[in-house]
Amino acid sequence: MWYFKINRIVIVITILALFVGCNKKERTCTFYHWEQTLDLKTDETQLLQDFNANELYVRIFDIDFKDKSKAPAFLSSLHVKNQLPENISVIPCIFITNRSFKNIDFAAVDSLAHRTAAHINYIENTQDIAFGDEIQIDCDWTPSTRVHYFAYLKQLKKYLPQFGTISATIRLHQFKYPEKTGIPPVDKGSLMVYNMGDFEDSEASNAIYSNDILKQYLKVKAPYPLHLDIAMPTFSWALVFRFGKAVKIIHHPDIENLNSAKEHFTKLSQNKYKINKNGYWQGLYLYKGDVLRVDRIDAKEIEEGLKLIRNNEYLNPDKVIYYHLFNNIKQLYTDEDFKSFNAVIN
Amino acid sequence: MKILKVLMLLLISTIFCLPSKACGGWEEYETYFRLFKPKYMIAGQEFASITFNDEPWSNISVWYPQQNEHDENLKLWKAYFPVSFDDQELKQFIYKLSEDDLKKARNNPSQANNEVLQWVLVNDTQIFDYLLFAKECEQHCNPRFVYYWEELKEKDLTVYNQVIAKGKAMFESSSNLFLKERLGFQLVKLMRHAEKYDECLAFWNTKLAKNEKSIMYYWTLDHIAGVQIIKGLAAEGRKNFIEVFLNSPGKRFSSYCSVKIDTDEEWHELLNACDTDKQKESMYFMRASQLGSVALADIDSLYQINPKSEYLPILICREINKIESIYLQNKEAENVFYQLYFNKSNINQELSDYLQKFNRFLSKCIDEKQIKNIDFWRISYLYTNFLIQDFDGVREQMALLSKNIPKAFKNQLDIIENLLLITDKSKNPIQRQNEMKSTWNVEVKDFAYFFMSHPSNKLPYPLNVDERMYDLRTELDTEKLKALVDLADNQDQLTWFAGYILKNHFSTNSEYLKEMLGTSYLADNENDLAVDVLSELSEEYKASSQTFYLSANPFNYLINDRDDELLKPVKYSKLKLAQTLYAINTAIKEERATAMDYYLLGNAQYNTSYFGYAWNAKAYYWSGGYYTGSFDCTDAYQNFLKAAKMSDDKEMKAKCYYLAAKANQNKYLTDNRENLYWKSDLKEEDMQNRGYRDEFLKLKEEYKDTEFYERIIEECKYFQFYVN
């Protein structure tokens, strides 16, 4: 009889353990890949391994309205130079400009969805890349395009039965005011927690991210009607200010070079540099007197932001997706930083 | 089917209703004052995309579109034929006829419906063969998609090789030089697309490079330059793109974009590779005209190479416009000139320093006397003197101009003379405002208005407020309208400029303004004042006005606000409305008002609100995007309740409670307008729970036995919701 008693205890403990385990589901972390060529370097694959990431969100093409053809067109399609490790599943992402949905009718929306599906299949076949079960659409829709964009999403789901999940990016203002902006007809969303600041403001510390602004957006009174994962920024850019106005953006500025090439740059403050003489830098011609403001987010700020998200009663992400994976990402954030991020969100 | 008909009727009625409500307006403004005009300073349109751009900081997006390329080609074809053809026929022959059309015509020449094609088939079959070959090449190099989503097909090198071999044979056998250079062009293009770069360069070097430098030569060089860059001969390739830029207007934009330099090393390498000063000038010109450039250093380098360069005036105009775009912003707080002039504060020292440097550069060039067209330089220089507020310097330079300057320059000087008068510190503002009549140039009007609006210039209120008549039509303002009526009645006391602003920004028609003032009083519930001012309108004005009369009596009620076609059409004047409202309000004040008075007052208040059919009694603009005019239905609601309480007639009571509920429903919308304007469906339950339509409940419980109840249960879906 003791045998049966012990068996019962084991079963009860197992069930309890399962319950406890279910409640404390570990949040996964992964990245967006937003370059046109998929050719991960050692640092990048190492990061994915460190995260135990088994998926990567990969932009596979853009859709933009072309003035010449007066219609939306597929642009910058992905070129796979090197295959991903086998354990990584690719979640294809498509960026669609808002203007693609202006001045078109429902027939064109349906046609666009149909052709998008065909183009996704085309990329999968020609680039020898296998897509996972999810697809993500990225579009900053507005009231005037909402109806067409949402119709497009519905049609896309119809034309892409092989994907179990269609997700969409959600901007912070869309999260905060769902009644005004509408809720896209998808299975889930990725809340984009970046691009918060004012480009024009030369006095601002950065235009990518601010926890103070995030706090304002997270003050909501009800959960967003879709499940939301989180897209966090891990990139930097340099804004070029000329006569006090922002005139250009330099992506992935070489910060080491800014600090070392003292004949070209004078460091004005933690993230501002003055140009000492006219010349080319990272493909742009800069002028003496220009001010470069390097916008990058301190690891501590990201941790703080992740805490805000973790503690928000209406957010319960399954995963955090960092935007984005690129060759020199470790110049910005160390392995330790990423470990800390992972620890905070869990 | 019935639903469809109702929907159609609703749609049609909406279409007819909308224009009557859309009487507000808007106007586009530039964000800065552009007073230095390239259209006067630069003769010719060759570089118009650089100089005439509205936004001088932006990149050049439209420069020599495809049309120019076609025109360039057309000229060559016209020169080739010994007979003259109509341009359209020639264009159709070159660009529109398909490969199939050509083949059909060859098999059956009598069916060729293009006169060039007919001529060629009889007189010059080599041309026919060439065109057929060119169409075949086009299929490979510039495939035309029927649908925008079509994919590029994989290149089939075997087919390319066949076409190239065929082309080479034609090239070698042809003795026609016109065709030979075109065949060469097609072959180079084909080899480039087939990625046979070495063969392409070899063909160019052996067969084409030494040809006469015709337009077709440069079209071919355009492809060769691209191949050279791919093959690592970057400096040579870029230099050749500059040659194309210089010599082929049709390919100018593409070659401009192709000379892309990323590093200082690439720049110096190209500079060293240049064979001529013209090429070097072009390098500086291209860099100086790029997006967001600060071009003085490049302009100076260009000047050092060739002080007479034709690029200099273009870049100088563009640079002055760029400076204006920040220096002369149309907001007081951001306008550097305005802040310096009135407040002696420099809000953009960096730009001021640059302007000073630019000014000194122009002065130096004038002194060195190496330049071409000195009057251009002097006018540019004196305008920068104006910007830095060296007004004496402007006058000195003006005195040095040639006596017979071109008319276009005179137009620019006319603008500057106006600017000098507007900013003349030796004259008081009244004197300046009157003297402006004799020198007036309409191109300075926006700046003049902006500048003269400063309090020290004593422009009377509200002429000194940055508003126009359409602002007032969109949102009535009693104080401003009172002041405008006063100005219109006393125009003889205004300066010339004040009169100009009154006429152009507002109106000098006193009666028109008085009707607006009366309407504004009605919106303010100042009915006695409305009666006074509207009584002053002449019969002639009333008869001609399209807004003085309402189209129906606003004291009637509607169950559904959209059913205004049920109303009896009558011309009901705003004056009569004001008089009646005044009479009812007096009765209320004297405590002799009846239930009917309150009911009528409620109706008028409701119907003249945003929601009613007589909204135009108190406003000139109705927006479909937000609540305009009078939209608060609180008074109407209260008056319907009072009427219901005071009445002894059960039918009347039922009607009043119904109308009160309607008014209260609108209050629900306006109280929550931030969230609800764009909602197509009312939140019935929320409204009910928050008590916004309690009167429906009263109707349901206490007035079921009235005829009015029977009627609304049929006609009002909101009430139906409540009852059911």
Image (cartoon, rainbow, N blue to C red):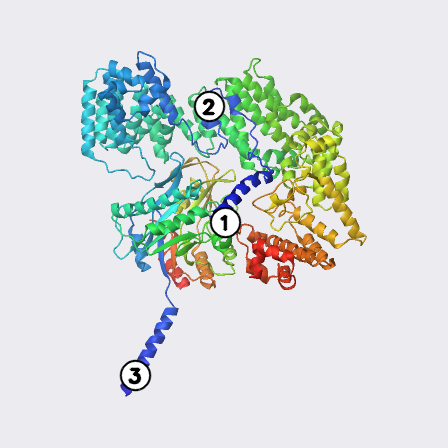
What amino acid does circle 3 point to? Ile
What amino acid does circle 1 point to? Ser
What amino acid does circle 2 point to? Leu
| Residue under pointer 1 | A205
C-alpha distance separating marks 3 and 2: 96 Å
| Residue under pointer 2 | B312
Per the image, label 3 sits on a secondary structure element best described as helix
In this rendered view, identify the residue nearer to me: A67 or A146: A146
Asked if residue B713 can be seen in this view, the reply is yes
Q: Residue at x 39, y 69 (%)?
A: A23
Give coordinates of residue A217: x percent, y percent. Answer: 50, 55
10 Å crowding of disc 1: few (<14), some (14-19), many (20+): some
- Vertical side of B423 occupied by A210: above or below: below
Q: Give the number of the disc on residue A6.
A: 3
Labels 1 and 3: the sequence-earlier one: 3
Q: Quadrant of the C terminus of chain B?
A: bottom right
